[in-house]
Amino acid sequence: MSDYHPELSGYEPSDESRPLRSKRVTTMMRVVVVLGLVALVVPGILTTMQLASNTAANACRVAVARYYPFAEASDARFEFSGAGGFGWQCYSIDQNERQTFVEPLGIIPAAPGLETRGIRS
């Protein structure tokens, strides 16, 4: 058996002076990976925000119709320190454009329970 291996010609096992990939290729790979991660994460975040906003608006509309039947409109918005704490807050708007706090909808809004106000089961 011979010690000559043509597939290993030019291979230097102790060649530490030359990196495996150039700086340009490494930078391009990093840019592609970051763009790929952004392309995967951002649509999920935007979809979640839109779904939460629509759910909060619908839940607020139902709560305002139940507790303030003569209100002109409803407004659901996310507040960091609102009347109901951290999360989505529901306000009714009367004919003079005054806003009245109706109820907190929570961090993740859901359909409101239609129990009597103030009494939770």
Image (cartoon, grey):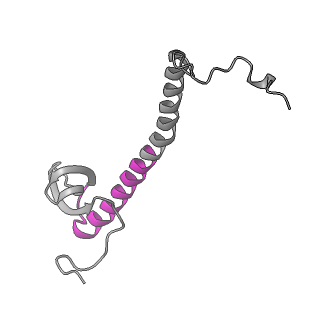
In the displayed structure image, the side of residue 46 where residue 1 appears, left or right: right
Verify whether residue 23 appears in magenta.
Answer: no
Which is more toward the observer, 13 or 56?
Answer: 13
Q: Residue furthest bottom?
A: 121
Residue 116 to residue 12: above or below: below
Q: Residue at x 42, y 50 (%)?
A: 48
Q: Position of residue 46 (x, y in %)?
A: 43, 43
Which is more toward the observer, 72 or 117?
Answer: 117
The image quarter containing residue 65 is bottom left
Q: Position of residue 73 (x, y in %)?
A: 27, 54
Which is more toward the observer, 80 or 118?
Answer: 80
In the displayed structure image, the side of residue 41 where residue 115 appears, left or right: left
> Where are the magenta residues, as a range?
46-72
Q: Position of residue 70 (x, y in %)?
A: 23, 63
Name the chief secondary structure element in magenta: helix
Which is more toward the observer, 96 or 30?
Answer: 30
In the displayed structure image, the side of residue 4 where residue 109 appears, left or right: left
User: Which quarter shows the N terminus?
Assistant: top right
The image quarter containing residue 15 is top right
Verify whether residue 63 appears in magenta.
Answer: yes
In the displayed structure image, the side of residue 1 where residue 103 appears, left or right: left
